[in-house]
Image: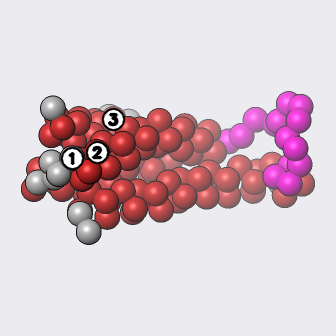
Amino acid sequence: MATELTMLAWSVLLGFVYIFATSTVVTRERGMKWNASARDGEAKPVSPLAGRLQRAQANFLETFPFFAAAAIAVVVAGRGNDTTALAAQAYFWARVAYLPLYAAGVPYVRSLVWLVSLLSILALVFALL
């Protein structure tokens, strides 16, 4: 299987890590009753950690569709090469690093890691042009 698709599969699993990390912390703070409810009405505020996890999850969900589309297109178009394989791996590992960096509130380095993931997506897109 193409490296780009392998990294896409791992990225899907990583997306679940983002979701579960966030939901675990938020449920711990708001309780199982809140989690099982329809969540109508105003929810009590979450801690800074839970807020950072929510924002990291949102950021992952914003970039993932672009990565998925580009990775699939590269493989379907037969444009995969060592550069696109490296780009797919860099995206995945940058997203792995991003979650704990954001959760810990680490500035600047977190932004650089995000930039690596963005440049990785762009590398895949440029391989299609």
Judged from the image, the secondary structure of the residue bearing numbered disc 2 is helix
Q: Where in the figure is residue 101, as x and y percent of width and height?
A: 41, 48
Which quarter of the image is occupied by the N terminus? bottom left
Amino acid type at mark 3: Ser
Residue labelled with disc 3: 111
Q: In this image, 37 relative to 18: left or right?
A: right
Mark closer to the observer (3, 1): 1
- Contact flag, marks 2 and 1 (Cβ < 8 Å): yes
Residue at 63% across / 45% down in the picture? 50
* Local crowd size for mark 3, using a 10 Å CA cut-off: few (<14), some (14–19), many (≥20): some
Between the residue at mark 2 and the residue at mark 1, the CA separation in whole angstroms equals 6 Å
For the view shown, which residue lies furthest in the front direction?
77
Residue at 82% across / 36% down in the picture? 43
Residue labelled with disc 2: 73
Judged from the image, the secondary structure of the residue bearing numbered disc 1 is loop
Q: From the viewer's perspective, is residue 112 above or below residue 78?
A: above
Q: Quadrant of residue 82?
A: bottom left
Amino acid type at mark 1: Ala
For the stretch drawn in magenta, the main secondary structure is loop
* Local crowd size for mark 2, using a 10 Å CA cut-off: few (<14), some (14–19), many (≥20): some
75 or 89: nearer the eye?
A: 75
Residue labelled with disc 1: 77
For the view shown, which residue lies furthest in the bottom direction?
1
